[in-house]
Structures are given as structure tokens and as C-alpha cells.
Image (cartoon, rainbow, N blue to C red):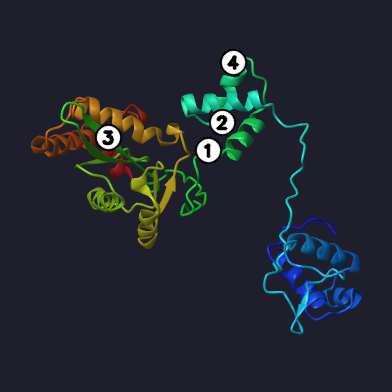
Amino acid sequence: MSYSNNPLLPKARADALRLVIEQDLPLTIAARKSGIHRSTLWRWKRKWLDINQNVQLSNSNRPTRQAGKWRLSACKWSIPTLSCRPHHSPGALPSWIVERIVYWRGKHNRCAGVVHAHCLREGTKVSLASVKRVLKRLKLLRPVSKWKRYRQHVHRPLANAPGELIQTDTVHLVDVGAGRRVYLYTLIDIYSRWSYVEYHESISQVVSLGFLMRGQDKAGFNFKCIQSDNGSEFGRWLNDQLQGRGIVLRHSRVRKPNDNAFIERFNRTIQEEGIHRSFPKPETIHNQLEDYLAYYNHERLHSSLQYRTPAEMLQRS
């Protein structure tokens, strides 16, 4: 019989042995009732006897009979499945290679690819698959949350009309001296380059939903597809809320900022021209952003739009 790791096998072995020990059935009949070969049941019985060596046995290899009953209370019926792990692995990695993999992982705390590259640089010849296997076996990889839901791939639409593709992001502004951080929520319409910005002192999916809905009201056209990065403020709850409003939320690829090239460029523009990369003051930031958005959407010429303004592109549509 081939090896099996079925968790119900210990109970099945116990039930078969009870037919032989408790009910005193012949080995052949008990094997037929259990659906196994008699030699298999004989091996199970020998294992059962080895497990219960401390039980007093008679010459017939059965527990001794006292007052007309077998002494079965002290017996362990369950026979566990033995491990299939080999006793010797001639193809295993040498221990010194495993130590080097653990060393580079602990020093840089980087992924398997980086650990593999450091090993090759120092002359340790090992494959990337072996590095991944060692890190996984030693549980040195970051565990994946069991609550993380698979994000179905959404085809990127062509921006042939306003609202067909919107890119959104958050800009983190840090005041090192005061030890505080504020955020700029930004979005841009790919077709017309119409943009919208809000200042917030915290980020969350609830804030993101309110920002996107206010941006849609300001724009005057409906959003059909919104593309964002994989930040926590653009998570599962926001996706469900936007789907209920008929809006598709699309996420860019991980560590691929070029997927959001338009909003990343606008983030740089708003910091250089709108707030001049300085830490904004709450009492003045709202007026600065409102004045700059009016200039950006109605007066600033865009070379990508053949030197038109976003407002002129919206009029054409």
C-alpha cells in the first residue's frame, strides 16, 4: 500500500484492531471487514503491541484476561502514521551554505532574490530556488495574511473620453522637526488632465471614498474606472463601495510606479508649483490648493494636450 497522510488513518487502524482484540475475530475475517489485506492488519497488530509494551501480555500476545474481560483500559488504540522523511539526504545543501543564506537574510532583511545575489557576490554557489526553499523552511519569509483577498485583474481602459480612466494617489508630507505628517489626496483625469487635490491630516479608506466622490462632483462628469496603487487607503472596503456606485477600482502592479505615471508627475508638479515642497500650514494650505487648481485646470498650458488647458479639453468632449 502506498504512503498516505490521511488524518483518519490512525482511527481506521484502531477500529480494525478492535475487531481482532476486543471482538476476538480471526485475522482474515477482521481484515475482510476492514477492507484491507490480512498482512497489513498483521503489521498493524505488531505496531500496536510495540506501542503497548507496558501492558501485561499473555503467551498468546493478547492483554491478560481479568474477571472475564481483557485489560484494555490502559491500551493506546490509535496507531500514528510514521513520517516519510528520509533518514539521509545526500543532495541536501551543506550546512555552511544554509548559514550564509541565513546571515544575508538577517543582515539586510531583503527578499530571496537579493539574498541570492549577495551569496553569488561572495562566491557561494547556490540557486535561487534553493534560497527560497531554505528561507521558507526556516520560516524567514514574511507570512501572507489569510485575510488577504485575491484582486481580480481589471483591463486598463483607453482614455478616449473624460472619466474613463482616473488615476489617484496620496502624497505624504513629513515635518521632521515637529514629528508630524500630513497628506495630499490627488487625482487626475487621463483624457483631459483635469486634476483635483485635497489636504488631510489622516488617511483611510473612508477619507478616500469621500475625496473621490467630491472630486467627481467638482469634475462634472462621472468616473468609470479609478486606478490607484496598493496602499492601505485603497483597499477592499473602498473597492466594494465604488462597485456599488458603478465605478471600477483598478490597482497598479506592485513596485511599478510607471503604471501611474500621470498622477506621479502631477504629484511632483503640485509640490514644486503649488506648495513649493514646503511643509504646509493648515490655515493656508486650503487657499493655496484652491488657487493653484484654478490655474492648473483653466490657465496652465500642457504640452501633452498640444498646448491646451484641461478646461478646453473638456469643452471639446
- Say whether disc 2 or disc 4 marks the residue closer to the N-terminus: 2
- Say whether disc 1 or disc 2 marks the residue closer to the N-terminus: 2
For label 4, the crowd category at 10 Å Cα-Cα, with few meaning under 14, some 14 to 19 and many 20 or more, is few
Q: Quadrant of residue 63?
A: bottom right
- Say whether disc 4 or disc 3 marks the residue closer to the N-terminus: 4
Q: Could you say where residue 186 lies in the image, as x and y percent from the top left?
A: 28, 40
Q: CA distance from mark 4 to mark 3?
A: 36 Å
- Say whether disc 3 or disc 1 marks the residue closer to the N-terminus: 1
Q: Which residue is mark 3?
A: 172
Q: Which residue is mark 1?
A: 141
Q: Could you say where residue 270 lies in the image, as x and y percent from the top left?
A: 24, 31
Q: Amino acid at mark 2?
A: Ala
SS type, badge 1: loop
Q: Quadrant of residue 56?
A: bottom right
- Say whether disc 2 or disc 3 marks the residue closer to the N-terminus: 2
Q: In this rendering, does residue 106 appear at all? A: yes
